[in-house]
Amino acid sequence: MLLIECPYCGVRDESEFTYSGEAHIVRPLEPSALSDKEWADYLFYRSNPKGLHREMWYHSAGCRRYFNAVRDTVTYKFKCVYKIGDSQPNLDELSSSAKHPADVEAK
Amino acid sequence: MKRIPNGGRIDRSKPVNFSFEGKSYQGFQGDTIASALLANDVKLIGRSWKYHRPRGVVGDGAEEPNALFQVEQGALTIPNVRGTQAPIYDAMVVNSTNAWPSVNFDVMSIFGAFSRFLPAGFYYKTFMWPAKFWMAYEHIIRQASGLGESPRESDPDHYEKTNAHCDVLVAGAGPSGLMAALSAGRAGARVIIADEQEELGGRLLSSSELIDSKPATKWLEETLEELASLKNVTLIPRGTVFGYHDANFLTIAERLTDHLALAQRSGPRERLWRVRAKQVVLATGAHERPIVFGNNDRPGVMLASAASTYTNRYGVLLGDSAVVFTNNDSAYQTALDLKASGMSAVTLVDARASNENLIEPLKAVGVEVINQCAVVNVIGKARVIAAEIQNLSDDGKSIFGAKQRIDCDIVATSGGWNPAIHLYSQSGGKALWNDDKACFENGISVQDQVSVGAANASFSLVDCLTEGAQAGRSAAIAAGFNTKNTRIPGVSCSAGTDLTPLWRTPTEDPPGRGAKAFVDQQNDVGVSDIYLAAREGFESIEHVKRYTALGFGTDQGKMGNISGMAILSEALGNSISDTGTTTFRPNYTPVTFGAIAGPEIGENLSDPVRKTAMHTWHQENGALFEDVGQWKRPWYFPKLNEDIHQAVDRECLAVRNSVGIMDASTLGKIEITGKDSGDFLNMIYTNAWKKLGINTARYGFMLGEDGMVMDDGVTIRLDENRYFMHTTTGGAASVMSWMELWLQTEWPELEVYLTSVTDHWATAAVAGPNSRKVVDSVIDGIDFDKDAFPFMASREGLLAGLPVRVNRISFSGELCYEVNIQANHGCFMWEQLIAAGAKYDITPYGTEAMHVLRAEKGYVIVGQDTDGSVTPIDLGMGWAISKTKDFLGKRSLERSDTARKDRKQFVGLLTDDPKVVLQEGSQIVNNASDQIPLPMLGHVTSSYYSACVGRSIALALVKNGHQRMGDTVYVTTPDKGFVSAKISTTVFLDPQGEKQNA
């Protein structure tokens, strides 16, 4: 079970949180002006990276605040958390930290 | 009794009586089932699951594949207890798990004679066709095989859970674990050290080595004393660390009473520890692996380390003569131990060339050593009589020369050691093959964790002690403590660890012929099965595992897995590192369901139960309840001898003809306030809200951004900037989260406050032509005149002086008033309404009648009539969609697929035979006589017998249904084939709504 740091409450057990998908998916201001493809991009298409991923979490059994996090989808490790509206962290800087052993061939 | 006169960890002054297979035996305090049976010269303890071959004890710990027992009977029975770890207690009842009718006479052993015809995949190949016979085969196969039997009664024991945090968690209390705990504990760190065995000490319990010039057990005693004196150290014997999860979250199953006689037991049986550790030290030791040879499963063939354990720790005299077969140094100590136990003849067979340093001490005590030979076969059936050896070629790939027979009672084998990397693997780490040591070992740490000692492929005692001390110190420092080095105790002489890999004795016969040689005894997987899998094209170890069952079962291949992988790589001509190992997953050893469930069992503890304020009244008036989410809702209120149909018919007719009353408290209620509430609702709901009059209600759909119906309900405008939203009973929590999501992420500029008030209000729906008279007679301050208080209006009044809010909304299509009161007055309000309605025979009705009543009017239940793929237009409710404003999901309604005219649409269905009630979920087709496969048009979503309409009615989603009114379609039934039905409007009663507007 992961430990997740809520930016409002501090470190709490994973069981208090709900995953809420990729972060920074902005709802178009004028949906009716979009083509079907543009709308589908917003609605369905997600980056699903192997590695660092900006995602949204919900402290559903706590303060009930949504917040953003950068998490490594290979190791599950949280690299950082930040509040909704805060600027996005630079993934290149975050990814310079240690690699997962799955990527390391020999001991 | 076959005992050595002195020594070991058993208490010879405390005899313990137990029974095995109905026969009485005696052991001593400190014995396990396995040691006690061996001390009674019981070598045959079970039958193998596939061939029913006689089997005996092989190991001395968690790796044991054979010594699995059914302990106790009835409700207390426990299946598959590992006899190598379970202690005996007075009056213990032990039975074999897999022998019918008895261990010594097993009728199924005939399978053994035909083993050539029962290869890997036999069941798949033979019983796959015809598929419908599988049920019959399975019955016989399950009876013939299988392991223990699960109890058929509910568990009389109770279990508890505890949460703990610590600086350093040490898994395993052998020499490395103890040193780690000692150095971290001395530094002041909060330490938890747990070990699966009955006693802490690990290999020291059976060691004949000296530590600080004292017997290892003496050092152990002193170390445990010091650890126990440290207040920051928690010792958990009988505690298996069985799970290693993310973020150093580990689970420990602590056995509290299983070692006690039944009469002495009290308190919980097990305790589940849920531990968050800053640092983890894995000192889980290693499992010895056997060398595989012909008939290596005969009772009396065991691991060399197990032979030492039974001799040294349990004082068992394993026989009069022994053959020790090894490819490494560690078994030399076993030969010494066996000789010292009083055996007259011990022969050590080493696959390797002779080494004078190793041989010297053995020769000195009269142990014969034979080099460059291998055990090729074992003579004896129910027990070992002799071993046959032959010369081994230099490359270890062939045997030659004449067979030599050595009579013996046991054959002890050692093929090397497999570090117990299970927890490391669970932590996310990747095992690596170490060619020098010929074992899989831990790679780099993924979590804040370190492996030490034998678990780290450092097998010598001095390495174990050193690595443990260092790891404990490093962990304490990492957790924020200052500490000096811990002194490493001196070790007399540490046994060597040299090894030349030999996984199996080569054979002159091709695989599949000659004596059966077992790799995984629990699953009867032989060398020939692995070769067969390779021949049939299985290359991945994961596939071979599933094809042959290698590594399945309660031991999860702790003994046989690595040998199996090595033999597979040999069959494939690969290296072992290319073949790879499987991933270990929790649990390390089987864990009881009781420990996992803990105290959270039964109706009130497994999941919260929500009851309305009127619940007691419902109970007292005979309601049967239905679970809706966590809520208990009255289902129907049967009168004497009524079945569900009679009761529901009566309840429905009462509502339509006079008045009924229903508990509607469970509907989700959310209060929405703030100056932007109207704008917010405009986005959340499909229809427009800002022009809604105060004290007026409106029905709304909530869509996902994909345009599909997510929830529905009536929302009332209480004031300029104050709305009262109803959600479905099941959707209340998710709707709340959904609205919070949009407010927090997309529209933080909106000033809107959401408050869940579901539990604050008790609600009674009073429905029927006489409802106005009932509410009017008990509620003051409201003009109930039909024009003064019209449909979809809301009013505040007083009931016996208590404030109530009355909403004239209806889910039954009748004239209806929903009366809301502060929840703690709910039952009082209900009783007042019941009393006031007595003269109209007011009838309480439940969810079943509610479903029928709303279906008669074609009202949708979200989640029953919809399934996340239905738009409001599909439901024929396009009128609820605003053309002018944006709302969540609106754009999706114009997507080509969503805007398609021939989507599955919501319609009524009337069976041609009005008595036939369709089954919900039934598929609908155009023409029953067409050739299958028939195109499916849709399915029945709701179906009832309607007493008010006087026939069956149904609602359905049917392709292009709105354009097919009056068409005949065919619906499947479970027993009558297809029945015909006509597509109709969804409204079966009062299409103009005169009743609700009355």
Image (cartoon, coloured by chain):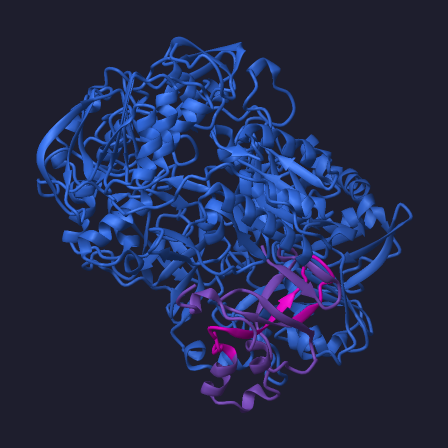
Chain colours: A purple, B blue
Q: Is residue B875 left or right of residue B814?
A: left
Work out whether residue B640 or residue B331 is closer to the camera in this orientation and state it.
B331
Q: Is residue B814 above or below residue B824?
A: below
User: Which residue of the protein is positioned furthest toward the bottom in this rendering?
Assistant: A33
Identify the image quadrant of residue B839. top right
**Residue B702 vertical placement versus B267 (above, below):** below
Q: Is residue B8 left or right of residue B978?
A: right
Residue B467, horizontal then vertical, whole percent: 54, 49
> Does residue B662 appear in the picture of this structure?
no
Camera-nearest residue between A67 and B405? B405
Q: Is residue B577 left or right of residue B873?
A: left
The C terminus of chain B lies in which quarter of the figure? bottom right
B52 lies above or below B712: above
**Residue at the spot 46% in from the left edge and 21% down from the top edge:** B314
**x and y, in percent, of residue B304 in the image:** 35, 32
Residue A54 figure quarter: bottom right
Picture coordinates of residue B606, whole percent (x, y): 61, 40
Q: Residue at x 60, y 44 (%)?
A: B488
Determine the main secondary structure of the stretch shown in magenta.
Answer: loop
